[in-house]
Amino acid sequence: MNLDLRKQDMTAMRHAMVASQLRTNAVSDPRVVAAMDLVPREAFLPETVAELAYRDTSVPLSHGRAQNVPIATGRLLTQAELRATDRVLLIGAAGGYTAAVLAELVASVVAVESDPALLAIARTALAGHANVTVVDAPLHEGHASDGPFDVLFIDGAVEAVPQALVDQLAVGGRIVSGIADRGVTRLAAGRRTAGGFALLDFADIDCVPLPGFASPRSFTF
């Protein structure tokens, strides 16, 4: 396909995603809508699956990973109540798409990824984003040396949010994450307080699992 025609097709699909998947499903922050309408999602995916960029399900990546569902990412972005001055710790950067959207909305982003193939895509695709730092580290460890952060954004479903990540937030900092519970995923949000943190569910939405976040298993006979 002619490259110009392909770009036009992708742009049309991106606008359609915003109109049919986001605006109709409580992605109500106009700044989030504008950013997701601007950032070319296909640029942050492996070429073999770039044509799937705007479907309303997850997109398979490498080693069992997947790009999160657009509506899940959009709802998390909206619930985070992002400010232009925020410093964000993004866990599960994948190929860098969510980091690029965040870069349009906040002061700085530290994007943590552990998969080598996804890191290579993210570093290339985010090369022009001066306010994004891509970090190669286990997802559950985050990047404490750049903290404290205003927002902890986990772009996928985890069984439990590690205290080590919460500790990288400033007191009063916001947390948004997918939560996995016995095969069911939902979205949750909360804040860190001086005494700890709490998350409250706000939507039952499919969300891709992230590795390394299993809840401790209690002993059974």
Image: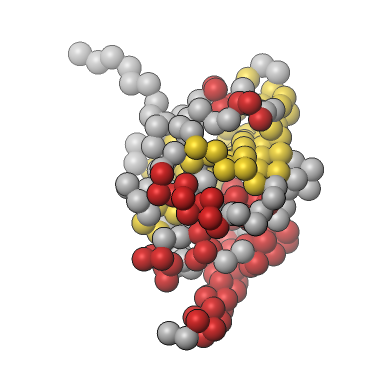
For the residue pair 90 and 160, the one nearer the viewer reads as 90
Residue 101 vertical placement versus 53 (above, below)? above
Image check: 119 left or right of 194?
left
Examine the rendering and report whether any part of residue 216 can be seen: yes
Residue 175 vertical placement versus 170 (above, below)? below
Q: Quadrant of the C terminus?
A: top left
Examine the rendering and report whether any part of residue 188 can be seen: no
Q: Quadrant of the N terminus?
A: bottom left
- Residue 59 sits in quarter: bottom left
Query: Residue 207, position in %: x, y?
Result: 45, 49
Q: Residue at x 47, y 47 (%)?
A: 119
For the residue pair 179 and 123, the one nearer the viewer reads as 123
Query: Residue 16, position in %: x, y?
Result: 56, 75
For the residue pair 175 and 164, the one nearer the viewer reads as 164
Q: Residue at x 78, y 48 (%)?
A: 84
Structure colour scheme: secondary structure
Q: Residue at x 41, y 43 (%)?
A: 115
- Residue 18 sits in quarter: bottom right
Residue 129 vertical placement versus 114 (above, below)? below
- The total of numbered circles placed on residues is 0
Query: Residue 154, position in %: x, y?
Result: 54, 40
Image check: 172 left or right of 15?
right
Q: Residue furthest left?
A: 221
Q: Residue at x 65, y 67 (%)?
A: 38
Query: Residue 105, position in %: x, y?
Result: 72, 52
Q: Residue furthest right?
A: 85
Residue 132 vertical placement versus 181 (above, below)? below
